[in-house]
Image (tube, helix red, strand yellow):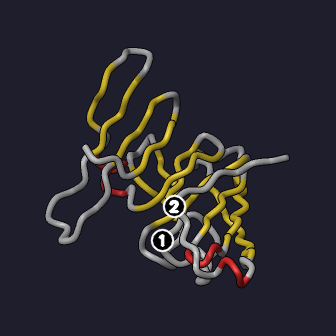
C-alpha cells in the first residue's frame, strides 16, 4: 500500500492511500492497533472522506482538503462521517502543494511560495441539556514569506519552539 497520509488517533495508527485520477477506485486504508498488534480495514466513511492532509487537534482528526478553497473538516468517530467546521475555507494565498502540521490548538499549512496559514481551532461546547456533539471553528491568519523564498515549494513541515 502506498502511504499517502497517516495519523495517530485514539492510540491507533491510521494509514491512507491517496486518490488517483480517474476516481474509479476508492483509496485503501488500514488501521494498526498496537495493543493487539493487529492491522484492520479502515471504516468506509473515514477512508472515503479523508481527501487531504491530516492533523489531530483536541483528539479529533482534521483534514485540509487537497481541493483548494474548501473548508476544514473533522471526522466523527461515532457516526463514521465528516463535518465541515465553522469558519472560512483555507485562505486563497495557500496554494498546492502544501504541508500541514499542528501544535496545541493551531494548524499550520505551508503552501507554495512558502506562505503559511495558521488556523486557530476553537472547540465549541454543546449545550448542557443537549445531546449534540462537540463542534469546532477555525480562524485563519496568513504569514507571507519573504520574496527571496517565493520560488520554494514545501515538502514537509515541523513546528518547533526555541
The label nearer to you, 2 versus 1, is: 2
- Residue ID at (51%, 37%): 9
Q: Residues within 10 Å of mark 2 (few under 14, many from 20)?
A: few
Does 70 appear above or below 37?
below
Numbered label attached to residue 97:
1
In the image, is 71 to the left or to the right of 28?
right
Q: From the viewer's side, name the closer residue of 50 and 76.
A: 50
Q: Is residue 139 left or right of residue 65?
A: right
Q: Residue at x 67, y 70 (%)?
A: 117
Q: Residue furthest top?
A: 36
Please name whichever residue, 71 or 149, is drawn nearer the observer in this view of the structure. Answer: 149
Residue at left offset 38%, top offset 46%: 80
**If you read the primary sequence from the N terminus, does the residue marked by circle 2 or circle 1 appear first?**
1
Residue 117 vs 148, above or below: the answer is above
Relative side of 105 to 41, left or right: right
Residue 145 drawn at (x, y percent): 72, 77
- On the image, the x and y values in percent for residue 13 come to 44, 33
Find numbered disc 2 in the image and state the secondary structure of the residue it sits on.
Answer: loop
Q: Is residue 38 above or below residue 22?
A: above
Are dots 2 and 1 in contact, CB under 8 Å?
Answer: yes
Q: Which residue appears at 25% of the width and 47% of the height?
A: 28
Disc marking residue 155: 2
User: Seen in the image, is 37 located left or right of residue 92?
Assistant: left
User: Which of the 4 image quadrants contains residue 1?
Assistant: top left
**Residue 21 can be seen in this image:** yes
Q: Secondary structure under badge 1?
A: loop
Amino acid at each position: 500500500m502506498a502511504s499517502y497520509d497517516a495519523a495517530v488517533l485514539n492510540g491507533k495508527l491510521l494509514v491512507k492511500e491517496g486518490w488517483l485520477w480517474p476516481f474509479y477506485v476508492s483509496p485503501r486504508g488500514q488501521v494498526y492497533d498496537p495493543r493487539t498488534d493487529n492491522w484492520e480495514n479502515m471504516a468506509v466513511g473515514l477512508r472515503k472522506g479523508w481527501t487531504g492532509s491530516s492533523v489531530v487537534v483536541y483528539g479529533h482528526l482534521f483534514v485540509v482538503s487537497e481541493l483548494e478553497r474548501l473548508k476544514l473538516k473533522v471526522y466523527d468517530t461515532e457516526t463514521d462521517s465528516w463535518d465541515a467546521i465553522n469558519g472560512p475555507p483555507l485562505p486563497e494565498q495557500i496554494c498546492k502543494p502544501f504541508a500541514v502540521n499542528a501544535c496545541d490548538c493551531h494548524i499550520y499549512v505551508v503552501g507554495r511560495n512558502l506562505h503559511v496559514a495558521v488556523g486557530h481551532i476553537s472547540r465549541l461546547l454543546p449545550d448542557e441539556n443537549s445531546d449534540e456533539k462537540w463542534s469546532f471553528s477555525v480562524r485563519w491568519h496568513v504569514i507571507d514569506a519573504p520574496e527571496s523564498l517565493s520560488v520554494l515549494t514545501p515538502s514537509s513541515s515541523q513546528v518547533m519552539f526555541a
